[in-house]
Image: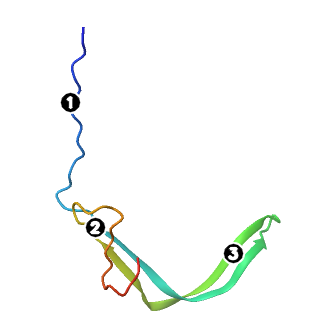
Amino acid sequence: MTPAPRPATTRPTPAQPRTGTGSAPCHHGELLQGVFLDASGRRCAGLVTLPLDGPGSAAVFVPRPGTPPEAVAVVPAGRTK
């Protein structure tokens, strides 16, 4: 007996491209950075910063259908990806 052929598999196409968003708050920079000992004497990496209310960065990513993953446009053009 010959098994029935498997149906062709296709990837589902979303009706709308998925949008990605992200944001990062501003901070005053690293005040203290290094490797310290914890209460048990184990080495532990540490970093101390002070957050700054208000300013920061935000980004929105909307993929264009048919665009290869390596082709990313940045708007405004003066920014980098």
Identify whether 13 is placed above or below 66: above
Snapshot quadrant of residue 81: bottom left
Q: Which of 14 and 1 is in front in this view?
A: 1
- The amino acid pointed to by label 1 is Pro
Q: Give the colouring mode of the picture.
A: rainbow
Residue closest to the far top:
1
The residue at the point 27 percent across, 66 percent down is: 63
Callout 2: few (<14), some (14-19), or many (20+) C-alpha neighbours within 10 Å? Answer: few
Report whether 41 appears left or right of 55. Answer: right
User: Residue 46 — which label?
Assistant: 3
- Judge left or right: residue 26 versus residue 29: left
Q: Please tell me which of labels 1 and 2 falls first in the chain.
A: 1
Does residue 59 lie above or below 56 as drawn? above
Q: Which of 11 and 49 is in front in this view?
A: 11
**74 vs 16, nearest the viewer:** 74
Instruction: Say if mark 1 contacts mark 2, CB within 8 Å.
Output: no
Is disc 2 placed on a helix, strand or loop?
loop
Q: Distance between the residues labelled 1 and 2?
A: 31 Å
Residue 7: mark in rendering: 1
Name the residue at 30% across, 61% down. 68
Q: Pinpoint residue 39: horizontal percent, then vertical percent.
A: 79, 68
Tag of residue 19: 2
Residue 60 appears left or right of 37 = left
